[in-house]
Image (spheres, rainbow, N blue to C red):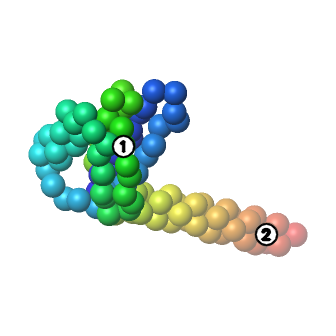
């Protein structure tokens, strides 16, 4: 998945996603053709379609975005948090047992 950010004069950046699996070099070359046009350009991605005036675009940033990796990262964080909660409750049980034994 690609994340495309289009920077334009006097306008907030536009960020869109595209599920295209084309290699980065080829993908960027295709996008760069937008900048060469003197007319309005239509940009179609898997998430949306845009009408762009190339002479107003100052730059385009393209990043690889890996949703599977991001989902796994969230899952690991959730599992760690769950393990910490379980560990804390286990420690509380041990303290209670020690107090009972001491009495």
Please tell me the numbered disc located at residue 52: 1
Secondary structure beneath dot 1 equals strand
Please tell me the numbered disc located at residue 96: 2
Q: Nearer the viewer, mark 2 or mark 1?
A: 1
Viewer-nearest residue: 63 or 35? 35
Viewer-nearest residue: 98 or 22? 22
Q: Is residue 53 above or below residue 48?
A: above
Q: Is residue 18 above or below residue 92?
A: above
Give the residue furthest to the front. Answer: 39
Where in the figure is residue 34, as x and y percent of width and height? 24, 40
Where in the figure is residue 18, as x and y percent of width and height? 31, 57
Which residue is depicted at the point 41% across and 33% down?
7
- Rounded to the nearest angstrom, the CA distance separating label 2 from label 1 is 67 Å
Which residue is depicted at the point 15% across and 55% down?
22
Which residue is depicted at the point 69% across and 68% down?
89
Q: Residues within 10 Å of mark 1 (few under 14, many from 20)?
A: some
Q: Which comes sooner in the sequence, label 2 or label 1?
A: 1
Give the residue furthest to the right. Answer: 103
Q: Residues within 10 Å of mark 2 (few under 14, many from 20)?
A: few
């Amino acid at each position: 998945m690609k994340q495309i950010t289009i920077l334009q004069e006097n306008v907030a950046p536009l960020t869109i996603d595209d599920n295209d699996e084309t290699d980065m070099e080829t993908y960027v070359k295709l996008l760069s053709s937008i900048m060469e046009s003197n007319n309005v350009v239509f940009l179609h991605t898997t998430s949306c379609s845009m009408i762009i005036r190339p002479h107003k675009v100052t730059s385009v940033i393209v990043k690889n975005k890996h949703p599977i990796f991001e989902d796994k990262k969230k899952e690991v964080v959730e599992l760690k948090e769950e393990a910490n909660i379980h560990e804390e409750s286990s420690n509380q049980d041990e303290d209670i047992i020690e107090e009972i034994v001491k009495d």
